[in-house]
Image: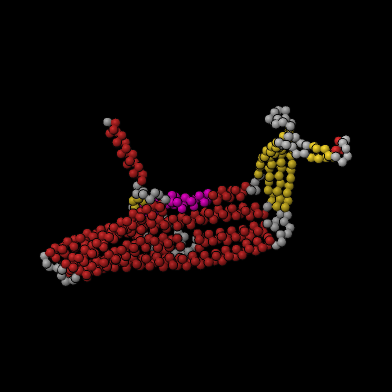
Amino acid sequence: MKRTILIAIALLFSFHINAQENRSLSLKEAIDFALENSYAAINASRDVDAAKKKKWETTTIGLPQISAKIDYQNWIKQQVSLIPAEFFGGIEGEFAEVAFGTKHNMNATATLDQLIFDGSYLVGLQSAKTYLQISENAKEKTDLGIREAVINAYGNVLLTEESILILEKNISSLEKNLKETNEIYLNGLTEEENVEQLKITLSSIKSQLSKTKKLKSIGYKMLNITLGIDINTSVLLTDTLDSLSKENMDLGLLNSDLNIENHIDFKIAKNTEKSNELLVKLEQSKALPTLSSFINFGYAGFGQDFDFLKKEQKWFDSSLLGVSLNVPIFSSLARSSRTQQAKIELEKARTQLTETEQKLLLQVESSKTDYNYSLEELETSKQNLALAERIEKKQQIKFFEGISTSFELTEAQRQLYTMQQNYLQAMLNIIATKAALDNALNISIN
């Protein structure tokens, strides 16, 4: 009885684990999952968190800084100084050996430092804010890349799934044709060459099916990597190639205009320009004076023995207030040279910004052209597939009636298989080019 209960528990546990390992995902669910769990998304979020910490680190430079220090000295052999012996009533011209100080010394100090003014610090605060914006924009760019990568990986898996179904259907039809042709040959009504030709075609399609099944396995693993899950996790895709291609048909996108100011690539180029502006300001700020202050409190103890932990030990307190003003006067034009270099980098960044703007406009036009072509190609592929199916069917009839040869039938079959793959690829291209156009227009893909 106990053994039966243990087996039942083990089965339930195994079912629970398997249920956790299997995932059913639509394309939207896959995108949402990858944006949270993919390796690139996780590291991009960490970069943003690190930038926030860096911003605070920079801010703290201008806040009060408190430090404490304890120094202990033990003169194993005290340093000896020579002074004229006549100071102690000795003979003139001779020197007396004297050891100053005590064998044991201890000092404890606490210091508060405060930066009052530093132009570099003010620029640093602006730079930290810009650095955070750069990290946030990098994450946005990463998210767009993840979306497109998931769409392509998801679509490629669906393509292999559909290809397998079509190849299996073609194999079934070929096997039926081969069987009928072989019977006709055995009855002496056709040539052996016709049987052999069908065998070659069947063997080729079986080989293609085997390859496609292997590609399917690799495709699922690639999708899992894109999602950020173990490559051996079982994933069930709930969308189909046909439904996604229909969902991604949007002629209105061809008339959409680019808001270049909101495009992530333009923002990144703009941040580069801002960073170089701050570098110019930083070099210029180095010509300004810096002002800082500090206040120090300390205690010192002395003795011939280590009695610092005893109540009788006498301690001498001290305190010090200081202000430091550093005024740069002349650097042999080094600061001017660094400032000019920073200005040159700024001009380069501005040129790159203009280049980025032009490239984005071209990218939109190119993506619209590709998307429009994919829409037209889908319709053309659909019509060609219908024609190829009719031609292949007619050739089958003619072949079994003895009107056409096996070569003509094989050619019609190959043409049909090509059109089938072209149609599947055309549906995939709709999805892929739509994703690329969404990226070009900086539209979130949901």
On whether residue 414 falls in the magenta region, the answer is no
Q: Residue 25's spot in the image, x, y percent?
A: 36, 51
Residue shown at the point (37%, 53%) measured from the top left: 221
Q: In this rendering, is residue 239 above or below 303?
A: below
Left or right side of 278 for 16: left
Does the image show residue 87? no
Residue shown at the point (45%, 67%) measured from the top left: 365
* Main SS, magenta residues: helix
| Between 49 and 430, the one nearer to me in the picture | 49
Residue shown at the point (55%, 51%) measured from the top left: 51
Q: Residue 178's spot in the image, x, y percent?
A: 18, 62
Task: Determine the image quadrant of residue 319.
Answer: top right
**Chain part drawn in magenta:** 26-49
On whether residue 47 falls in the magenta region, the answer is yes
| Between 411 and 195, the one nearer to me in the picture | 195
Q: Residue furthest top?
A: 311
Does the image show residue 192? yes
Q: Quadrant of the C terminus?
A: bottom left
Q: Quadrant of the N terminus?
A: top left
Q: Residue 52's spot in the image, x, y percent?
A: 55, 49
Q: Residue furthest bottom?
A: 403
Residue shown at the point (49%, 66%) measured from the top left: 359
Q: Residue 172's spot in the image, x, y percent?
A: 22, 59
| Between 220 and 397, the one nearer to me in the picture | 220
Left or right side of 25 for 82: right
